Amino acid sequence: MARSRVVLEGLRVQVLKRSDGSLSYTIVWPDCSVDEEGDSYLRLHEGSGSQKTYAYYLVDHLRWRLLEGLTTETIKILDLHRYMGAVGAQVPMPYGRPWRVPPQRPYGASALQVAAACTKGFYVYNCASRGINNELRTALSGQRLPTKADRNRSALGHLKKSVPSNPLAPSNPPRRRHPKMLPEGTKPRLRGAVNTARDAMVVQWLSDTSLRVGGLTGLHLVDLHLRENAACNECKSPHLHVCHREANPNRARAKIKPDWEMVDGVITGGEIYRVSPTMISTYFQYMVTEYQKYATGHGMLLIQLAGLNVGEPWSADAARGMLRRAGRRADLPGRITPKAFRHQITNDVLDVADGNPMVAKGVGNWASAQMVDEVYGHPDLHSPEFTAALEKVWGDQE
């Protein structure tokens, strides 16, 4: 039987807007009183993107715990394993009825890892700070031998003898797979299906760079250095700077947060992306036809062109919706997402760069060349080279 979609006891996530425009997240009860355990744990992540993620994972667990009649003082490690099983993990024990039922879906492998980390952190912190349930705290504070990856991530990894383990995490962590690319012919068909100069610019900018949608919708006009030898002296070619700002009015935020600053009106630092001539052309087309007509002086690049908030900053969710609708009009298979553009250009650059992951890493601002090589550095099963090599081996076996 499906669980009611009504929030149990009204336990919910509350978004708090700070005086500087940044957002914080906590958990409150129906009478708006703060859940002290949840709030104290979430405060540890104040100012980081993890706070929002952990808030929504934690409130889901607290609702389950409330239904089960458990508290931090009484819950046991087996109860936490039951919870992980109820949300989608494979556990060798009965866990009761599934917690996430349609239209919700069970957590995938990556989501289970986040849920396990959040749940462990919540109980280890609260059991230690309140001096309760030492049995649970001990069960969650185990150690394991370091792997080669653990040693590589540490400056003195060769000296490591043990690393923390999480008994709630999936035993088989997710392996990186080849990401979903754009359907064939997506870019030209999308350009013919968009309705505004802004939307055409967004498609072009996603096609020619590896920008994430949060970074794109968070751009300010001062971040754009669309001429050669800009005053920042960080890139001779036309480029842009993606800067993480907590106080963007459309709540768009860059995922990566390198330091940046404005000196004499010039942005320096942040993530730097090269800009193509076609990107510059679509930018000016948008600026002279739509931006100057509707912009309200907030200084952000992408604006709403219709509705009650015309001229205000355009959100990342709105950009995703535009791509989804344009994909339907263009009769493209599946859902067109901004992330697929990022995967596509990384894969394309790796192909033309003779498989050099350092080039693809630089183009995509990826964290490491090793990650690029692991995700993208395998042959296309339908490439002429792959087919020729396979046919040659088959011929030698005759």
Image (cartoon, rainbow, N blue to C red):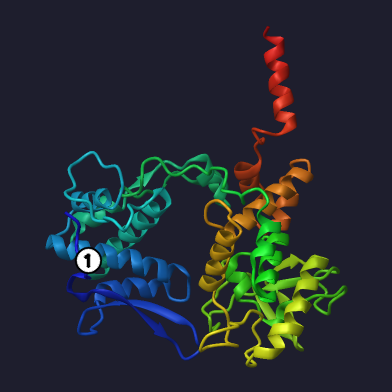
Across and down, in percent, residue 97 comes to 18, 50
Residue where numbered disc 1 is placed: 63
Residue displayed at 17% across by 58% down:
75
Q: Amino acid at mark 1?
A: Arg
Q: Is residue 99 above or below residue 222?
A: above
Q: Is residue 318 above or below residue 341?
A: below
Q: Is residue 214 above or below residue 169?
A: below
Q: Is residue 115 above or below residue 255?
A: above
Looking at the rendering, which quadrant does residue 27 occupy? bottom left
Drawn side of residue 338 relative to residue 274, left or right = left
Across and down, in percent, residue 218 comes to 60, 76
**In this view of the protein, which residue sits in the foreground, 120 or 96?**
96
Which quadrant is the N terminus positioned in? bottom left
Drawn side of residue 325 relative to residue 206, left or right = left
Residue 350 seen anywhere in this rendered image of the structure:
yes
Drawn side of residue 38 relative to residue 320, left or right = left
Which quadrant is the C terminus positioned in? top right
Mark 1, secondary structure of its residue: helix
Across and down, in percent, residue 223 comes to 71, 78
**In this view of the protein, which residue sits in the foreground, 147 or 99?**
99
Across and down, in percent, residue 63 comes to 22, 66
Residue displayed at 43% across by 51% down:
110
**In this view of the protein, which residue sits in the foreground, 362 or 315?**
315
Residue displayed at 27% across by 56% down:
100
Residue 127 seen anywhere in this rendered image of the structure:
no
